[in-house]
Each structure stands twice: as C-alpha cells, then as structure tokens.
Image (spheres, grey):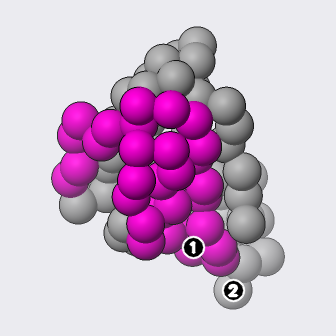
Amino acid sequence: MRKLSEFIADTMRMPKDVVMDLPRVSVCGDREIFIENHKGLVEYTDTEIRVKMRGGIIRVSGTSLRIVVMEYDRMVINGVFKGVFYD
C-alpha cells in the first residue's frame, strides 16, 4: 500500500505527507515547532513532549515546553528546543 501511495504522489505531483498520511514537522529557530498529521499526544512535560505519528513517535526535548495549539491533526509547541527525534 505504501509503494502505491508513494507512486500516486510522485505521478500526480502531490505532497507525500498528504497522500501517505505522513507527519509534517516545521521548526522555526529554536523556539517554535509546528506538527501536522499527528495521531495524538503520548507524553507531555515541560522538558519532553512525545507525539504519536503513523509509524512511530516524534519526541521533542528542551526546556519550558508548552503546547500552545492542539487541534485534531495540528499542534504548535513553544519553548527552548534541544532536539527533535523520531523514535
């Protein structure tokens, strides 16, 4: 199924994150992260936020972390980031 979705995305020149239900992570400096196409929150502390995605977990580590927007498929995190990891 994944190969078919990727083929369709490539053939029709559509974004793979949309066709294949992949997360989109945008980082603005070391102060703001936008996560789209997430599947829910796993863990939330002021030093680590873990977000479920298709195929794994996105882990954000840092200090003074806050979720400032959380919608069905979109999240915005503020704070001072040390790293973004795919587990």
Please tell me which of labels 2 and 1 falls first in the chain: 2
Does residue 44 belong to the magenta stretch?
yes
Question: Looking at the image, which residue is at 60% across and 43% down?
Answer: 61
Q: Secondary structure at mark 1?
A: loop
Judged by depth in the image, the label closer to the viewer, 2 or 1, is 1
Which label number is shown at residue 78? Answer: none
For the residues bearing labels 2 and 1, Cβ distance under 8 angstroms: no
Which label number is shown at residue 1? Answer: 2
Q: Secondary structure at mark 2?
A: loop
- Find the magenta span and give its range: 42-71
Question: Looking at the image, which residue is at 53% across and 68% down?
Answer: 53
Does residue 45 appear left or right of residue 21 in this picture? left
Amino acid on which the number 2 mark rests in the picture: Met
Nearer to us in this view, 21 or 4: 21
Q: Is residue 25 above or below residue 33?
A: below
Does residue 54 appear left or right of residue 49 in this picture? right
Label 1 Cα neighbours within 10 Å, binned few <14 / some 14-19 / many ≥20:
few
Quadrant containing the N terminus in the rendered view: bottom right
Q: Position of residue 37 (x, y in %)?
A: 43, 57
Which quadrant of the figure has residue 3? Answer: bottom right
Q: Main secondary structure of the magenta part?
A: strand
Question: Looking at the image, which residue is at 22% across and 40% down?
Answer: 69
Question: Looking at the image, which residue is at 58% across and 46% down?
Answer: 60
Nearer to us in this view, 72 or 49: 49
Does residue 56 belong to the magenta stretch?
yes
Q: Position of residue 14 (x, y in %)?
A: 58, 47
Residue occupying the far top of the picture: 29
Residue occupying the far bottom of the picture: 1
Q: Is residue 14 visible?
A: no
Q: CA distance from mark 2 to mark 1?
A: 14 Å
Q: Which residue is mark 1?
A: 54
